[in-house]
């Protein structure tokens, strides 16, 4: 493994199952103190990072010092509770050991920080405080398939019942409509059903 530092954007492929925030969270922490390393709990999942040159890396964040922007803050009875998380599309800088031997390159992160959020308060999650969470795949929206245009949907066509009543019988054959035969249910009394 080689030490490396990469910067990239979080890909929207997974999220924390039962995450509290509106964004697709890959790492979420909360605390209730003003100390540098307060009582903290954090949950995370391995996620993908795409660098500016298009390289996709898998990030294992579980032993990293994670610096996150505080996205929600509540003060109750003199105790401040702050929530912070990494969300999809966040720009991250990651330091760690790169393992390129597997099917996809993986970074065992030692330090993770968000870029471009200097005005926001920060939260620092100490290494080893992040527990593995349950990942949930994010379904990609596929564009709807455009059905083939039907002659029956043309604006000039009138309803079938109106045409049949307006035309005299014998001028033009009615369009053939395939009808499914009606299913006959057996009589439970054992008597044969009448032939129609």
Image: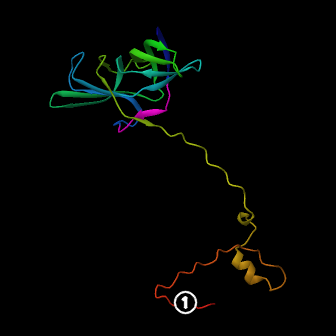
Looking at the image, which is closer to me, 137 or 11?
137
> For the C terminus, which image quadrant?
bottom right
**Label 1 neighbour load within 10 Å: few <14, some 14-19, many 20+:** few
- Residue tagged by mark 1? 192
What residue sits 24% from the left and 29% below the top?
A: 81
Q: Is residue 23 visible?
A: no
Q: Position of residue 82 (x, y in %)?
A: 27, 27
Q: Is residue 14 magenta?
A: yes
Is residue 60 depicted above or below 12 in this figure? above
Q: Residues in magenta?
A: 10-18
What residue sits 48% from the left and 14% below the top?
A: 99
- Quarter holding residue 23: top left
Looking at the image, which is closer to me, 185 or 123?
185
Which residue is farthest left? 77
Which residue is farthest front? 190
Q: Is residue 16 visible?
A: yes
SS class of the residue under badge 1?
A: loop
Q: Is residue 15 left or right of residue 55?
A: left
Q: Position of residue 182 (x, y in %)?
A: 60, 78
Q: Is residue 22 magenta?
A: no
Looking at the image, which is closer to me, 19 or 77?
19
Q: Position of residue 41 (x, y in %)?
A: 26, 26
Q: Is residue 75 left or right of residue 64?
A: left
């Amino acid at each position: 493994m080689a030490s490396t530092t990469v910067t990239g954007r979080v890909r929207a492929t997974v999220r924390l199952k039962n995450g509290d925030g509106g964004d697709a969270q890959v790492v979420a922490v909360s605390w209730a103190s003003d100390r540098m390393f307060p009582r903290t709990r954090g949950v995370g999942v391995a996620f993908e990072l795409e660098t500016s040159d298009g390289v996709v890396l898998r990030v294992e964040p579980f032993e990293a010092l994670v610096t996150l922007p505080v996205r929600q803050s509540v003060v109750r009875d003199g105790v401040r509770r702050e929530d912070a998380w990494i969300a999809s599309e966040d720009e991250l800088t990651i330091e760690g050991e790169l393992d390129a031997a597997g099917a996809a390159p993986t970074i065992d992160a030692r330090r993770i920080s968000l870029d471009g959020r200097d005005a926001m308060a920060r939260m620092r999650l100490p290494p080893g405080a992040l527990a593995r969470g349950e990942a949930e795949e994010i379904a990609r929206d596929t564009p709807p398939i455009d059905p083939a245009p039907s002659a029956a949907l043309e604006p000039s066509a009138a309803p079938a019942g109106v045409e049949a009543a307006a035309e005299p019988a014998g001028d033009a054959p009615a369009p053939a409509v395939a009808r499914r035969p009606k299913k006959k249910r057996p009589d439970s009394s054992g008597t044969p059903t009448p032939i129609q």
